[in-house]
Structures are given as C-alpha cells and as structure tokens.
Image (cartoon, rainbow, N blue to C red):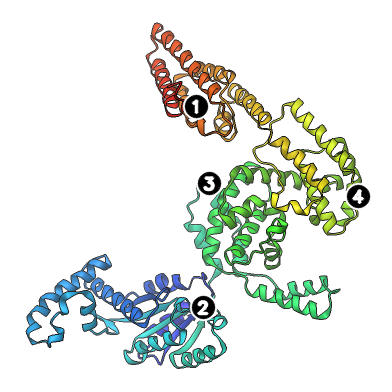
Amino acid sequence: MNILEELKFYCETQNPVGALMLSGEWGCGKTYLIEKTLPEDIVDTCIVLRVSLFGLGTVNEIQAEVKKKWFAALSEEKGISEDTTPKIKKVIETSKGILGTIKAFLPDDWQNIDRGLASLIDLVPLQNTIGDKKVILVFDDLERSSISTAELLGSINEYCENQCFNIIIVANEDKILKTVHDKEQFSYKEIKEKVVQRVIHFTPDYDSVVKNIIKELSPRNDKYKLFLENNQSILTAILAGEIDDELIIESFKNDNRRLKQDELKKETERLRNLLEQRPHNIRSLKCAIQDFERIYTILVELQFENCEIWLSSFVAYMMVSKAGLIIESQRYNNLFSKLNVEKLYPGFFETSCMVSGIEDWVCCGDWDENRIRFELSAELNRSKAKLPIEIVKSYLLPEVDDSVIKDGYPELLRQVYNGDLTLDEYVLFIENSYYARKYKVALGTIEWSQVQNGIRLQMKRLIADKREIGYSYRMISEKNKELFTDEEWESYCLIQKFRDNDVQIYENNQRIYIELLQTNINKAYQELGNKRYNALTQEMVDVSFEIFKNSGNANKNSFSMWFEGMWHRYKDMQDINIEITEKSLMDFKEKLSRLCDDYKKNDCPIALMHTIKFIEIIKEILLGNATEEVV
C-alpha cells in the first residue's frame, strides 16, 4: 500500500464519514510525512493545518490552537505577511475598521470585540475551505496530550461531523492501548469506532529514509559520507529491524533448555516482550550517524580495518539506549549493560566494539577523547591476540572460552609472578580473579604475595626505562571494592598508588615536553597540551627559547601563541609549583629581552616585533597568574 496515495485519496474525499488515523511508532517519520511530503503533493487543492496535541491540557486550548492555525493559513493565502504573528495582527487591524463601522448595531456585550485576537477569532466561524482550497485538519501526538483520549476524540469529532472538515489523526495507537485501563480502553475503542473511519499503519520506506539521512549529512570528515554510503544496507537493516525474532527465541530456548519449564516459559516471554520493543526511531538513527563520525575519525587514525562493525554496534547501542532499554547495574560496573543490545541486534552488535568510554558518552554525554582513544588502542591490541596466553591476559574472563582459559592461565600466572605484564594487564588480572570466583572457574591457587612482587618489578622497569605513563589507564571503581578480597584490593591499590605518584608522571611529562619540542614540533603542538605538569622548569624554558630563537618569522608567532595556550592558566594546574614556574617565566622574559637587543643590532625588525610580542605575552601570563611578590 502506498501510504501517501491513501492520504491524498482521503484528502480529496468530499464529506468523509469520519477521520483517518495514521498510526505508527514514535520517531518513524509520521510527522515528516504529514508536515512536509503530503502538503507539497496537494498544495494546489488543499491546505494542511497540523496541530500538535503535545502539552495541551483542555479542549479550549485545542480549539484556540486550531483557530490560530486557521487564521495564519488565511492570512498566508491572502498574502498579508510571511510571519504568523504579524499575519494575525494585520487581520485584527483590518477587521477593526470594519468592526468600527458596525459597532453601533452590535449588542452591548459585543461592543469590546476589537480589544484582542481572542474576541475576533471567537466571532469568525471556521470554514472547511480557504479560497478554493480544502482545509485538512491534522491532529498530531494524540497519545501525548494530558486530556483523556476519549475526550480528545470527541472534541475532534466536532470538526469532522458538524463542520465537515477532513481530519487526519496521527498517533502511536500501541502506546494508547498500553497506557489506558480496561474500562478506559473500552471507552476509547467505542468512541474511536464512531470518529475514525479507517486506520492506516505507517511503515516508512526505510531504504529511502537512510539514503536521505546520508544525503543531507554535512560531515567534517570528507571520507565519512562515502563510508556511510558503502554501509547503507547495514543501517537500513538496523532501522527496519530485519532480524528473525523466532530464530532468536528458538536459539534462546535451546541455550536454556536446562531451566525448569515454568522458568523457561517466563524468560522466553520476557525475551519476546523485549523483541517487540525493538526501536525504529528515525531521530535516534540520525543522532547515531551524526555522532559516530567522531568515533570513525579515531578508528581511521588508529588504522582499524573493520569500521563497519563498529558502526553497526554503535548505532544499535544508541537506538536501544534512546529507547530506554539499556540494563544499568552499577554494582557490576555495567558489565551486563550490553545484554539487551545483543538480544535485539544479533549479527549487528559486537560487545567488543562498545568500549566503556563510548558507553558513557552515549548514556551520560561524557565525551572523553583521551579515554576513548586509550580504550580503542587497547581493543586494537586485543583483537590481535591469537594464542591462549595472549587472550587470557587481554580479555575479561566471561568473554573467554573455557578451553582457552585452561590452556592460557598457567603461563599467565608465570608471567604475573615474573613482572612481565603491563600495569593495565595486572588490573585486568585482578578483575578476572573476581569473575573466576563469581563463575566458579578453577584457576588454582594464586599466591598474592608473588603477584605483588611481580607488580613491583614492573614498576621498577617503568622507572628505569623512563617510559611515558599514559593519561588514561584501566581502573577499578572504589564502589566495587566489596567485590574483591583484601589481597586482591591491596594489589590493586599498589598499582594505583604508583600511578598517583605525580612526581613520576610529572618527570616523564617534562622529559617528553623537551624531547618533542626538539624532535617533532608539530606533534608537540598536538600532544603536550594534554599532559600534566607540576612546573615550568628551567630546562623546559631553555629548550623553548632555543626553538623560538631558531624559528623563522613564519613560525615565531605560532610558537608564542602555542606557549600562551599552554601556560596562561598555570596557577590552576593541580600541584603546580608556582615559585619555580614564575622564576622560569621571568628567566624566559630576560632571555627574550637580550634576544631583542641582538635583533636591533642586526636590523631584524620583523623578528624583533615577534619577540616583543612574546615578551608581552609572558608579562600577561605573569600579571594574570603570578603571586603578589612577583607583581
């Protein structure tokens, strides 16, 4: 059935018996069809007036809204103005002249008819035509009004039966039937039978919808739109829900055949109810497609090869999240938050393609690019794990096959005791000790004193090698402390205490600051601002000065601006040593002053100008942040 043609046929019907109801899920495109597509198709013969019932609390409010829309359409047809409010005002002003001439003949209680719009609207009866065009009244969001549905339909029937308007009611009838009580449901069905002559169930052309979403997208990444076009069929399948639910249910029954019959029946019914709630919301899909561009850009930078499965997983997760179907369990660190997504979108959703940083962004709005990059990099490394030992030290225990655990854990313990794991891998090992206990996985006896010795060995290597300590790393939430034994938590605290040793972090970051400025200035510009510092040291100033001095005029300005961005709020930095930093800034200013003298002697006016500007920047940094003694 061509829904647009059905709507047009109804609109062209003279004196219809009743209203036409267009029913469909929220966000499936009903309003767009009514507000955009239909009016454009019948513009020569009909005027479509859409009234949203969302938030309207009385029948009088509905009537006022209908009249407002009708007068706006009347003024538009007469060409009074382009804006609704001026249109209505002009109608009032025009009518005042007419009313003024007949006021003497009106009854006393009509004498103040020109005092406002409401009086004018009440006076003039609505007509089902404007000029030579039929007026089609559309009542949208039927289920979102605070008025009882039966009362609403009765009010709408007044326009259809007594004023002979063609009426289209847009609703999510499933929502109405689920929310009204049995008695109200009978009343609703009874009055609906009198008011509504036919119900059309709206199912959009999902392929065209997805195609148009991609077409209208204006991404920052030039390659993103092509990527979406190449994966349009995946997006269409997710939006349309092209999934065999009966196959899902049969598979579930087979996997859980050991359950008692009553329990299996109950769980099967729960699954069936979940599958019936699979969303088809176009707005949610638009949001997912728009947001995934940020993830896509990072995936490409990290050289992921399977971006399409990340796309389908992200879209599926967001669709389920926006439908309010995500399982939240803070106690288990949201380990089970993805279960409903897996059930609703098998074949499209991969658990490994939804890292916790992306989850928090989707559910809570917390975008942390450093964390997401870190987790995606870790996932990329995990995807390369092939041998049992590589798998068991990279994955959470519930994600690993039993045979792999048996084959890989003995070697893992040896590496744990020898200090051969990264600190993140040690944290994962501690987490998996909890999961082994929870799922009764026999790992043998773990000597936690040897585990802690291994952790200390790894720490010593980190310090000796002067390796960079990452900005983001694997953590266990304090609120999950009760899940672990004292020995397990003590081992984790050993790692966290080392990571919280800011001196080590700051020393490494100062070294990186110096090395990057000397070896890769562009990378320095990009990365150094994301690191933590407890001081601007003399060594950092020395290398900064040399970089500025040896830069061409084209780069002097960009360096000084970058330096300002790095240090203009140094006093707000955690653990900052203000005395050392301000002494270094003063020394930097003196070095630049002497450089000015050299430029003056050698007649280098442009270099001199850039240097003077840099001096002023440092002065402003000090004036804005320095202690009273320095000022």
- Nearer to the camera, 6 or 438: 438
Instruction: Give yes or no for contact between labels 4 and 2 (Cβ–Cβ under 8 Å).
Output: no
Can you identify the residue that label 2 sits on?
Answer: 172
x and y, in percent, of residue 321 in the image: 60, 63
Tag 3 or tag 2, which sits nearer the N-term?
2
Where's residue 604, x and y in %? 40, 12
**What amino acid type should be assigned to the residue bearing mark 2?**
Asn
Query: Which residue position is annotated with label 1?
Result: 563
Looking at the image, tell me whether mark 4 or mark 2 is earlier in sequence order.
2
Measure how far apart labels 1 and 2 are at the Cα level.
57 Å
Image-based side of 20 in relation to 465, left or right: left
Amino acid type of the residue tagged 1 in the rendering: Phe
Mark 1 or mark 4: name the one nearer the start of the chain.
4
Question: Where 231 sits versus 630, above or below?
Answer: below
Which type of secondary structure does the marked residue at label 1 adopt?
Answer: helix
Q: Nearer the viewer, mark 4 or mark 3?
A: 4
Pick the residue in front: 288 or 498.
498
Foreground tag (2 vs 3):
2
Q: Is residue 350 visible?
A: no
Q: Is residue 527 visible?
A: yes
Which residue is disc 3 drawn over? 221
The residue that label 4 is drawn on is 407
For marks 4 and 3 on the same chain, the one whose residue lies earlier in the sequence: 3
Q: Amino acid at mark 4?
A: Asp
> Is 176 above or below relative to 283?
below
Question: Element at badge 3?
Answer: loop
